[in-house]
Amino acid sequence: GIQPEELLPANRLVICEDIVDHTNVGAIIRSAAGLGWDGVLLAPRAADPLYRRAIKTSMGAVFEIPWARMSNWESGLLVLRESGFEIVAMALRDDAIDLSEYAAELAARPRKVALLLGTEGDGLSSRWLSQADAVVRITMRHGVDSLNVAAAAAVACYALNA
Protein backbone atom coordinates (compact mmCIF):
# COMPACT_ATOMS: atom_id res chain seq x y z
CA GLY A 1 0.00 0.00 0.00
CA ILE A 2 0.82 3.69 -0.20
CA GLN A 3 -0.07 6.76 1.86
CA PRO A 4 -3.71 7.87 1.40
CA GLU A 5 -2.63 11.41 0.44
CA GLU A 6 -0.90 10.02 -2.65
CA LEU A 7 -4.31 9.11 -4.09
CA LEU A 8 -5.83 12.61 -3.81
CA PRO A 9 -4.81 13.73 -7.34
CA ALA A 10 -6.80 10.78 -8.77
CA ASN A 11 -10.12 11.10 -10.62
CA ARG A 12 -11.77 7.82 -9.57
CA LEU A 13 -11.40 6.16 -6.16
CA VAL A 14 -13.21 3.25 -4.54
CA ILE A 15 -13.65 3.59 -0.77
CA CYS A 16 -14.29 0.41 1.25
CA GLU A 17 -15.85 0.90 4.66
CA ASP A 18 -15.30 -2.15 6.86
CA ILE A 19 -15.58 -4.78 4.12
CA VAL A 20 -14.28 -7.69 6.18
CA ASP A 21 -14.28 -10.56 3.69
CA HIS A 22 -10.87 -10.97 2.01
CA THR A 23 -12.50 -12.36 -1.12
CA ASN A 24 -14.69 -9.27 -1.47
CA VAL A 25 -11.76 -6.89 -0.96
CA GLY A 26 -9.72 -8.78 -3.56
CA ALA A 27 -12.60 -8.79 -6.05
CA ILE A 28 -13.26 -5.07 -5.54
CA ILE A 29 -9.59 -4.26 -6.12
CA ARG A 30 -9.59 -6.44 -9.24
CA SER A 31 -12.65 -4.66 -10.62
CA ALA A 32 -11.28 -1.21 -9.81
CA ALA A 33 -7.98 -2.02 -11.50
CA GLY A 34 -9.46 -3.77 -14.51
CA LEU A 35 -12.05 -1.07 -15.12
CA GLY A 36 -9.56 1.78 -15.03
CA TRP A 37 -10.11 3.31 -11.60
CA ASP A 38 -7.17 5.11 -10.02
CA GLY A 39 -7.03 3.60 -6.55
CA VAL A 40 -8.73 2.09 -3.52
CA LEU A 41 -8.96 3.44 0.02
CA LEU A 42 -9.73 1.07 2.89
CA ALA A 43 -11.21 1.72 6.32
CA PRO A 44 -9.09 0.65 9.30
CA ARG A 45 -11.27 -2.45 9.87
CA ALA A 46 -11.46 -3.53 6.21
CA ALA A 47 -9.84 -6.85 5.29
CA ASP A 48 -6.13 -6.89 4.38
CA PRO A 49 -5.57 -6.79 0.59
CA LEU A 50 -2.25 -8.57 1.11
CA TYR A 51 -3.87 -11.58 2.74
CA ARG A 52 -3.29 -14.62 0.52
CA ARG A 53 -6.96 -15.10 -0.37
CA ALA A 54 -7.40 -11.40 -1.26
CA ILE A 55 -4.33 -11.51 -3.51
CA LYS A 56 -5.60 -14.65 -5.23
CA THR A 57 -9.09 -13.23 -5.77
CA SER A 58 -7.64 -9.97 -7.10
CA MET A 59 -5.56 -12.00 -9.59
CA GLY A 60 -2.57 -9.94 -8.45
CA ALA A 61 -4.29 -6.58 -9.01
CA VAL A 62 -3.34 -5.56 -5.45
CA PHE A 63 0.16 -5.12 -6.88
CA GLU A 64 -1.04 -3.14 -9.92
CA ILE A 65 -3.43 -0.50 -8.57
CA PRO A 66 -2.51 1.93 -5.78
CA TRP A 67 -4.33 1.32 -2.51
CA ALA A 68 -4.05 2.71 0.98
CA ARG A 69 -5.56 2.24 4.40
CA MET A 70 -7.04 5.45 5.80
CA SER A 71 -5.79 5.84 9.35
CA ASN A 72 -7.85 8.98 9.93
CA TRP A 73 -11.18 7.52 8.89
CA GLU A 74 -13.24 10.12 10.75
CA SER A 75 -12.04 13.03 8.61
CA GLY A 76 -11.62 11.00 5.43
CA LEU A 77 -14.65 12.33 3.57
CA LEU A 78 -13.76 15.92 4.37
CA VAL A 79 -10.28 15.43 2.91
CA LEU A 80 -11.73 13.81 -0.21
CA ARG A 81 -14.28 16.60 -0.66
CA GLU A 82 -11.60 19.27 -0.18
CA SER A 83 -9.62 17.51 -2.94
CA GLY A 84 -12.54 17.94 -5.33
CA PHE A 85 -14.21 14.54 -5.09
CA GLU A 86 -17.95 14.06 -5.30
CA ILE A 87 -18.81 11.47 -2.66
CA VAL A 88 -21.12 8.81 -4.13
CA ALA A 89 -22.52 6.19 -1.77
CA MET A 90 -24.03 2.89 -2.88
CA ALA A 91 -27.00 2.01 -0.71
CA LEU A 92 -30.36 0.24 -0.79
CA ARG A 93 -32.48 3.30 -0.06
CA ASP A 94 -35.80 4.31 -1.56
CA ASP A 95 -34.49 7.82 -2.24
CA ALA A 96 -31.33 6.60 -3.98
CA ILE A 97 -30.73 7.57 -7.61
CA ASP A 98 -30.58 4.74 -10.12
CA LEU A 99 -26.93 4.10 -11.03
CA SER A 100 -27.60 4.45 -14.76
CA GLU A 101 -29.22 7.87 -14.25
CA TYR A 102 -26.28 9.06 -12.18
CA ALA A 103 -23.81 7.68 -14.74
CA ALA A 104 -25.55 9.61 -17.56
CA GLU A 105 -25.44 12.82 -15.53
CA LEU A 106 -21.77 12.22 -14.71
CA ALA A 107 -20.96 11.70 -18.39
CA ALA A 108 -22.66 15.01 -19.21
CA ARG A 109 -20.77 16.86 -16.45
CA PRO A 110 -17.52 14.98 -15.63
CA ARG A 111 -15.99 15.32 -12.17
CA LYS A 112 -13.90 13.41 -9.64
CA VAL A 113 -15.76 10.55 -7.96
CA ALA A 114 -15.15 8.68 -4.72
CA LEU A 115 -17.41 5.60 -4.66
CA LEU A 116 -18.35 4.50 -1.13
CA LEU A 117 -19.03 0.82 -0.50
CA GLY A 118 -20.29 -0.49 2.83
CA THR A 119 -19.71 -3.64 4.78
CA GLU A 120 -21.36 -6.92 3.89
CA GLY A 121 -24.89 -7.13 5.26
CA ASP A 122 -25.30 -3.77 6.99
CA GLY A 123 -23.92 -1.57 4.21
CA LEU A 124 -22.52 1.88 4.86
CA SER A 125 -22.62 3.44 8.31
CA SER A 126 -25.25 6.16 8.76
CA ARG A 127 -22.45 8.64 9.46
CA TRP A 128 -20.81 8.11 6.06
CA LEU A 129 -24.11 7.75 4.24
CA SER A 130 -25.34 11.09 5.59
CA GLN A 131 -22.21 12.84 4.29
CA ALA A 132 -22.53 11.57 0.72
CA ASP A 133 -23.18 14.05 -2.09
CA ALA A 134 -25.24 11.42 -3.92
CA VAL A 135 -26.67 8.03 -3.01
CA VAL A 136 -27.03 5.53 -5.87
CA ARG A 137 -28.48 2.05 -6.20
CA ILE A 138 -28.53 -0.69 -8.79
CA THR A 139 -32.14 -1.36 -9.78
CA MET A 140 -32.87 -5.06 -9.37
CA ARG A 141 -35.62 -7.26 -10.78
CA HIS A 142 -37.23 -10.70 -10.43
CA GLY A 143 -37.43 -10.49 -6.64
CA VAL A 144 -33.67 -10.04 -6.16
CA ASP A 145 -33.06 -7.17 -3.75
CA SER A 146 -29.32 -6.65 -4.11
CA LEU A 147 -25.96 -7.87 -5.35
CA ASN A 148 -22.97 -8.93 -3.29
CA VAL A 149 -20.79 -5.89 -2.51
CA ALA A 150 -18.04 -7.06 -4.88
CA ALA A 151 -20.49 -7.59 -7.75
CA ALA A 152 -22.11 -4.21 -7.07
CA ALA A 153 -18.66 -2.59 -7.06
CA ALA A 154 -17.90 -4.09 -10.48
CA VAL A 155 -21.17 -2.80 -11.94
CA ALA A 156 -20.63 0.68 -10.47
CA CYS A 157 -16.97 0.88 -11.52
CA TYR A 158 -17.99 0.03 -15.07
CA ALA A 159 -20.92 2.46 -15.13
CA LEU A 160 -19.02 5.39 -13.62
CA ASN A 161 -15.69 5.00 -15.40
CA ALA A 162 -14.63 8.12 -17.26
Image (cartoon, rainbow, N blue to C red):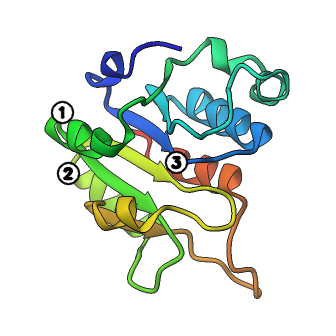
**Alpha-carbon neighbours of circle 3 within 10 Å: few (<14), some, or many (≥20)?**
many
In the rendered image, which quarter is residue 47 located in?
A: top right
Location of the N terminus (image quadrant): top right
In the rendered image, which quarter is residue 48 located in?
A: top right
Tell me if residue 44 comes above or below residue 155 in the rendering.
above
As shown in the figure, which amino acid type bears the numbered disc 2?
Arg
N-terminal of the pair, mark 1 or mark 3, is: 3
N-terminal of the pair, mark 1 or mark 2, is: 1
In the rendered image, residue 71, in percent from the top left (x then y), is placed at 42, 29
Which circle marks residue 109 in the picture?
A: 2
Residue at (68% x, 49% y) in the render: 150
In the rendered image, residue 60, in percent from the top left (x then y), is placed at 74, 16
Quote the CA–CA distance across marks 1 and 2: 18 Å
**Alpha-carbon neighbours of circle 2 within 10 Å: few (<14), some, or many (≥20)?**
few
Nearer to me, 73 or 120:
73
As shown in the figure, which amino acid type bears the numbered disc 1?
Ser
In the rendered image, residue 109, in percent from the top left (x then y), is placed at 20, 51
Q: Which residue is mark 1?
A: 83
Q: Which residue is mark 3?
A: 17
Q: Is residue 27 left or right of residue 65?
A: right
Circle 3: element type? loop
Residue at (76% x, 37% y) in the render: 22
